[in-house]
Image (tube, rainbow, N blue to C red):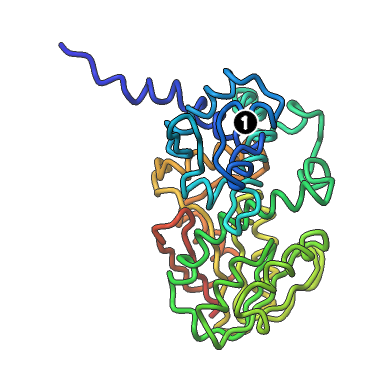
Amino acid sequence: MSLPDPSPVLDLIEAFRRSKTMFVAVSMGIFDRLHDGPASAADLAAALGANQDALGRLLDACAALGLLRKVDGVYRNEPIAEAYLRTASPDSLCGYIRYSDRALYPMWSNLEAALMEGTHRWKQTFGWDGPIFSHFFRTEDAMRDFLRGMHGFGTLTSPKVVEAFDLSRFRRSVDLGGATGHLTIALCERYPGMRGVVFDLPQVAAIAREQVALSSACPRIEVVEGDFFADELPDADLYAVGQVLHDWTDEKIGRLLRRAFDRLPPGGGLLVVEKLLHEDGVGPLAANMQSLNMLIATEGKERSASDYSRLLHDAGFGQVEARRTGARLDAVLAVKA
């Protein structure tokens, strides 16, 4: 009897090595330096104060991963690195990569303890009780770096999300916990008759205003400071919550959904943007991995379409429909009868 193909197991054994290679190259500023011009391992080692032979191995690994191109001992960025791995790129994912390296990577080493206790690993890993925004993002630079990385993710997903349903009947959207405004920007750019509000904490709002100012829909977008659990929600006929509900327990989600429901007029909608698990809980793989990530980092988890439907019906919503977008995030639209 022949043995099964070991490739999936062998690939998983080595998977973290590929991630860490990219993480460290971003952290060291390799792609930023190569944006300024091609360079050899000797040039980069001298600029970074690194060991030339060791750095050469990292550069060769990045080339093997398709992030760099090496010709006659000289390295240059591939287009994918120029777009996503360079700090100054408008589509940069560097902020989230650095967060993954410095926060998530060490916390994932404590996954077994999280499974035994069912709680996040901030205290075990860093000595913090939480919440995340008062510790890891305690400086403006750290907050800005993370949010710009999340904005990069948002620009990849939000245009697909706002196409999942015909939202043209809505006139004023409010994105609760809207971060840099990528979802509101996508909504207002797709629907010329819509006005949008990005609603988030004061330390986030300043960064949102910078991103909104770059959009052609800027005149129709407002940034309002507030806490969606404590402050009055701005008027809207469409509320949106993008990668917000997965942070919380069912009880906290219910509180937020009921607040939105009470503020909406009849016929008003709520757009939920999250990774949707399959109904049996197995797959898509990215949703399973994110659910484990939420275990180590928050008090939340990923859910299926029926899970969100139940929560939305419990909050008072009538019609609920979920759609896969083909992007990393999916969409659920609930309507108030």
Q: Residue at left 46%, top 43%?
A: 286
* Whether residue 189 is situated above or below residue 55 in the rendered picture: below
Kindly identify the residue that appears in the image at 47 percent across and 53 percent down.
Answer: 328
Query: x, y percentage for residue 252?
Result: 69, 54
Quadrant where the N terminus is found in the figure: top left
Front residue of 87 and 143: 87
Residue type at the position of mark 1 = Asp
Left or right relative to 244: residue 323: left
Residue 206 lies left or right of residue 186; in this view the side is right
Q: Residue at x 53, y 42 (%)?
A: 290
Q: Position of residue 84 (x, y in %)?
A: 54, 49
Horizontal and vertical percent position of residue 234: 74, 77
Residue situated in front as seen by the camera: 205 or 175:
205
The residue lying furthest to the top in this view is 1
Q: Is residue 216 above or below residue 77?
A: below
Relative to residue 113, is residue 207 drawn left or right?
A: right
Which residue is the site of mark 1?
43
> Given the current orientation, which residue lies at the most extreme left position?
1
SS for dot 1:
helix
Q: Residues within 10 Å of mark 1 (few under 14, many from 20)?
A: few
- Determine the residue located farthest toward the bottom in the rendered image: 193
Question: Residue at the location (63% across, 44% down)?
Answer: 32
- The answer to whether residue 104 is above or below residue 166 is above
Residue 18 percent across, percent down from the top left: 49, 29
Q: Nearer the viewer, residue 61 or 306?
A: 61
